[in-house]
Amino acid sequence: SLDIDNIQSDILVGMHKNTELFFFFHVNNAATFKSKLASDIVPLITTTTEILSVDTQPITAVNIAFSHTGLVTLGVNDDLGDSNFVAGQYADVHNTSFVIGDDPSTWNTAFAGTNIHGVFLLASDTAANIASELANIQSILGSSITEIYRLNGAARPGAEQGHEHFGFMDGISQPAVNGFTNPVLPGQTPVDPGTFLLGETGDPGLDLRPTWAKDGSFLVFRQLQQLVPEFNQFLTDNPLEVGELTPEQGSELLGARMVGRWKSGAPIFLSPTADDPILAADPNRNNNFTYLLDVPNPNVENHFNQTNCPFGAHIRKVHPRGDLDPAGENSHFIIRSSIPYGPEVTAAETASSTTSVDRGLAFVSYQASIFNGFMFLQSIWINNVGFIFGKVDPTIGVDPIIGTLGGGPKNISGLNPLVPVDESSDFHDDPWNDVVIPKDFVISRGGEYFFSPSLSGLGAIAAA
Ligand code: N7H
């Protein structure tokens, strides 16, 4: 089993709080910073064990992670065995072999370059608690650090709690970690801990890691702006005309088919024509499916059929359950720990169908290899019109939620369920590209790659 007293809380479990601050900093004085890290900061860091029980959860949970330039600034020159980490996320904006799809001009200047050395993640029930913990940390570290940027995340209010800004329930599907997750829920795939934690069984870079890096994880941070009124307008303008559905229901169905789940979280593969909130709320059922069998017609081969779920639906693109052989699927799992940021849509924004206030997702993923995790999903799956490979339609399109073709229109296969099921259909007619998404509704504002060390790893960094 894993040494969960030594693993930071956000990696395997999440912060379990409704507000979260991402505080990005630059280190000015490495010697002072390291001395305070050892004496005062490490004792503040929340462990996995602490977050698991309400009795031991701190009022404000604290995690810390460093960029590559941060580690170098602190005198840590060990090779962690991850070239994406070394180059930083801004370099990947210009990566032509593996395209993450970002437009550098939409990047927040704080992220452009390699100026960020580290990030504090502070999570609590109230913004006031976070402010007081931040004041504490700033008084400990004094002028040894400078703030570069901050982003306040918060759960959405009332009935929207747990839903991201487009309105869909998030945080439903996570991989199960061998030696940690108990019980494993139906439909959860158990994977080696080394998929997420360096130095553990299954770590693809096991031989490359310095000892102190064991039980740390690479944290990919992305500020992903969401154009919510524009997204809603697109759905309103393009209701799917299926059976007896009202235009409103047709719009709802289109959104659900873009995501692969209804707003409640119910998977469309199991409930293809109408939302099913009871299914959505049942953890024993809401992940219990693969795309291998077509539910109403179990004999129809799934490569030819997107009646229940488009090949390109967001959750199918990023987790093609059963569409690939298990090895191809299992090496690309990430653990997500994102939280929405920004206020609710205002009446004026709704009326004009135009975003005027920044809101979106503070995206966080953990993986032991940035390439196998975030990078592979983003470039080989999300932004690849050919993925999922081997289907009857060879041009499925990019991910309708987060994929991009440089901001322009996106043809997505099978968003309308009344698409041909017949494998003899003529490819050249492209009969599957029935709904065209005119522009991107998610825009990257930038991000960075970090390493979230174990507590003993933090001690080693402080002593470097
Ligand atoms: Fe996605 N959304 O609201 O549409 N995502 N995502 N994501 N995402 C998921 O199953 C969303 C993003 C994954 O195992 C759900 O927990 C939005 C990035 C993965 O079946 C919803 C944004 C990446 C899964 C959303 C966004 C991923 C997943 C269903 C950006 C990776 C699990 C809830 C603004 C690079 C899939 C759930 C599975 C689920 C949405 C970003 C990956 C509703 C709005 C950048 C692996």
Image (cartoon, rainbow, N blue to C red):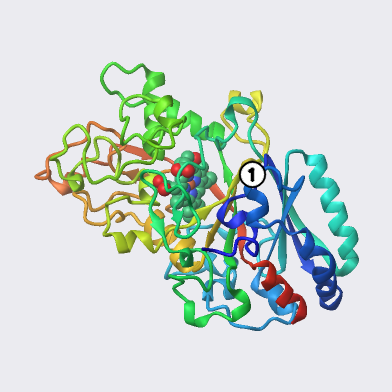
- Residue 187 percent location from the top left of the image: 36, 45
In-front residue for pair 417/30 = 30
Q: Quadrant of residue 351?
A: top right
For the question of whether residue 464 can be seen, the reply is yes
Mark 1 highlights which residue?
16
Q: Identify the element where label 1 is drawn.
A: loop
Where on the picture, by quarter, is residue 386?
bottom left
The answer to whether residue 92 is above or below residue 242 is below
Q: Residue at x 58, y 68 (%)?
A: 215
Residue 184 position, x and y percent, is 42, 48
The extreme left residue here reads 424
In terms of image quadrants, where is residue 361?
top right
Q: Position of residue 433 (x, y in %)?
A: 27, 41
Q: Residue at x 61, y 44 (%)?
A: 339
- Going by the image, does 413 lie left or right of 235? left
Left or right: 166 with respect to 277?
A: right
Quadrant location, the C terminus:
bottom right
The foreground one among 219 and 11 is: 11
Q: In this figure, what is the number of numbered marks?
A: 1
**Does residue 364 lie above or below 272 as drawn?**
below
Asked if residue 238 can be seen in this view, the reply is no
Q: Tag 1: Cα neighbours inside 10 Å, few (<14), some, or many (≥20)?
A: some
- Residue 103 % position (x, y): 54, 57
Q: Give the residue type at disc 1.
A: His
